[in-house]
Amino acid sequence: METNIVLRRGVETDLPQVLALIQELAEYERAPEAVTNTLAAMQRDGFGPDPIFGFFVLEDAAQKITGLALFYTAYSTWKGRMLYLEDLVVTEAARRGGFGRLLFDAVVAEARATGAVRLKWQVLDWNEPAIAFYKKLGATIEDEWLNGNLDEAQLAHYHAAPAAVAVAEATTGRHL
């Protein structure tokens, strides 16, 4: 592992490089058009009045971000507080240097420090290098759970019960 790489908690000024890494990951996952997130949304959601995610970065001597682990707190009705690892990515040039492990270790430490009883993430079924990486770390890769998802358009067109809309509007103060 290179010694000029620094692991640290991400800060707002990292977001342009973070978004670029996310786009690099989407290209690797064969879905570059799927990234619709914006820098403004990430600033709001990570550093606004109610931040909902955190992240760690790896930075080289030139202050270029070469790795990212983005996570957020989630909740399991069966187990309690958990941390969800949304993305773990290392630039192609820095792969196989132990950096993915360093980022994963930081997320595990964050989970422990915040009282999480579980750490969860997803990995694509065709991504054999990532599956092997997680298995090497002792993780269980499940094959029995299927992912449910409503995208932005589906959410917009979904007809929620008026009572549910009223509760959401009262809670958020936003008109839906």
Image: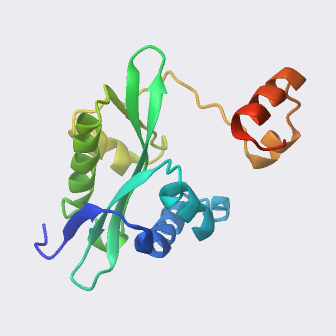
Q: Measured along the vertical axis of the image, is residue 80 above or below residue 33?
A: above
Q: Which of 92 and 168 is in front in this view?
A: 168
* Residue 165 visible in the snapshot: yes
Q: Quadrant of the N terminus?
A: bottom left
Q: In this view, does 53 lie above or below 114?
A: below
Which residue occupies 61% across, 59% down?
Answer: 31
Please count the marks in the image.
0
Question: Above or below — where is 176 with respect to 19?
Answer: above
Q: Residue at x 51, y 68 (%)?
A: 19
Q: Which colour scheme is used?
A: rainbow
The residue lying at 55 percent from left, 55 percent from top is 45
Residue 36 versus residue 173 in the image, above or below: below
Q: Where is residue 29 in the image (x, y as percent from the top left)?
A: 53, 57
Quadrant placement of the C terminus = top right
- Residue 173 coordinates in the image, percent (x, y): 75, 41
Which is nearer the eye, 14 or 86? Answer: 14
Residue 32 vs residue 81: left or right?
Answer: right
